[in-house]
Amino acid sequence: MPAPDVLPADTLLYVDGVTVDFDGFKALNSLSLYLGKGELRTIIGPNGAGKTTMMDVITGKTRPTSGTVLYEGSVDLTRKAEEEIARLGIGRKFQKPTVFEALSVRDNLELASLGGQKLGVLLTMRTKEETRERIDTVLETIGLAGRRAVLAGSLSHGEKQWLEIGMLLIQDPKLILLDEPVAGMTDADTEKTAELILRLKGQHTVVVVEHDMHFVETLAAKTTVLHEGRVLAEGSVAAVRADPTVIEVYLGRS
Amino acid sequence: MNDRTTLLGPRGRIAMFLVLAVLLVSVPALNQWVPPGSPFHLPDHAVPLVGKYVCYALLALSLDLVWGLAGVLSLGHGAFFALGGYAMGMYLMRQIGDRGVYGNPELPDFMVFLNWSELPWYWQGFDQFPFALVMVALVPGILAFVFGWFAFRSRITGVYLSIISQAMTYALMLAFFRNDMGFGGNNGLTDFKDLLGYPLQAMETRIGLYVASVLALGIGLWLSIRIANAPLGRLLIAIRDAESRARFLGHRVLAAKLFVWTLSAMMAGVAGALYVPQVGIINPSEFSPANSIEVAIWVAVGGRGTLIGAPIGAFIVNGTKSWFTGLFPELWLLGLGTLFVAVTLFLPKGVIGTLIELRLRRAGPALAATNLEPEHAGA
């Protein structure tokens, strides 16, 4: 798989010409996207534009029909299983919050921190002091320090979303994919989520797929607009909002 | 913090092992040391009967390990139990030697009857007890590993897995009914004489088998609780509730499921091997799908996912069954159905699950409030 000569040294993820063909329907149509290290990127687009399919391809859930997905310059993600990709440092948050409801908040984080461990380790391991400290740090970051002993099932919708982000953070991933993190959230919770994401910028590469334009403006990051499986426009939020084709296919409708 | 909410606390665990110790000592003591005239005397036939319940309890525990913890509802666990039983039965058949009806020192009676001239290859080695002992766990273990490998790798879950596990035990039942399989056809294996030289009819042997069964149940419980309390136990619960989330966290979902599934099948095999010498027969009806479904009922009655509840459910249902069939033999199936409906309606978490719930609700409402309908949570 030849890496292109023009690839900048700080590129973390290189998606080139990716097509996903579901029996004639092209969910992705020669999509190309480059993500830099530590970058915060927002991705918007109407329903069916291919946002979720794009995440599925990056995380190994869907195999592209053609195209290249290179991670850290040389790792071909199209040939890896979901678990392997997770172990390479790519964390994904689903649209619907999925935390382990029957486990406490703390146990959710502990289990996330053990991702990729061998069975033998999972059978014998006692929680290390170092893991305990990391759990505390993440609990502070996501604002759930006071809720550590509560079962995740009894958290509010917003708290579950933060816990799920925390479960990604504790694995210290290089790339974090967030699928509609503020869907169904109250305004106050949306505000807190934006603060949380802005704090992650620089330490991790963060991709946020979102419908909520107000939220996208708050993040004020480089924005990619997808439409019919292709990149329609890319640039600052303001530039994208001013783009006439974007207005026509997407913004104009709301 | 380490006191997992679905399981017993450290005090409960001590109580559980005390109950097991009482079970271990009381049955032989009431049979051997209390004179037969006393109302506390346990008749001879009751010892293997309670021993049979203990084997069922171990079988129920093995199912709860995969169903309660990992969410894999097997409706074919009776197959692993029966395979363990057949492995033990083959040893017991070889032990008969020339004391069979036909007096053939090599061949079991049914083979002589079928005009077979030599022992099939897969019967070789079963005259050695250590070999048979290994096979008791290995045969169900290998079947479970292969079955699990294909099923879990293809991500077959939920009701689909239940159905194919049911098909597995049904297919085995049909196979074992055939005479040319070499397992005694529909009569199965029976007329056992002795085990390691001890006559099976002797009270000492029966008590020895009973003690071995209780010890096996104790070891099974200890092992299961260890797994449940280790990070692996939390991972299994995570897989049960949100399998793909666990996968995206990088966990080895296939390996974790396969491990606990194979271990569970081996546990069921050991239970079957202890069952056969106590009841004196193993035949293909043990593979019957209805048997496997009944095991799921025991677990549900005791409390799914509590581990300790599964053996208790097995005792409750089978104890009731023995008592009920003595009184109204033809009504048992109705009784079992009523029991299951009643538990589903009034104790959806089973006997032990409900007790743990009550204990938690006293400890703190926030911990107990999950998974409960609002009207329950307010009560």
Image (cartoon, coloured by chain):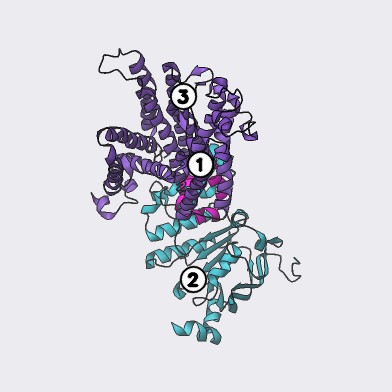
Above or below, A77 against B73 in this view is below
Q: What stretch is highlighted in magenta?
A: B234-259
Task: Look at the numbered discs 2 and 1 and tell me whether their residues touch, using CB distance below 8 Å.
Answer: no
Indicate the secondary structure of the residue bearing disc 2: loop
Disc 3 is attached to a residue of which chain? B
Q: Which residue is drawn at 38% across and 42% down?
A: B294
- Chain letter matching colour purple: B
Q: In this view, does B21 lie above or below A138?
A: above
Q: Name the residue under label 3.
A: B212
Rendering colour (chain A): cyan
The overriding secondary structure of the stretch rendered in magenta is helix
Residue B358: x %, y % from top left: 28, 41
Dot 3: element = helix
Q: Write down the residue under mark 1.
A: B177
- Please rate how many residues cluster around mark 3, counting C-alpha atoms within 10 Å: few if below 14, some from 14 to 19, many from 20: some
Q: Residue at 37% across / 40% down in the picture?
A: B298
The label on residue A210 is 2
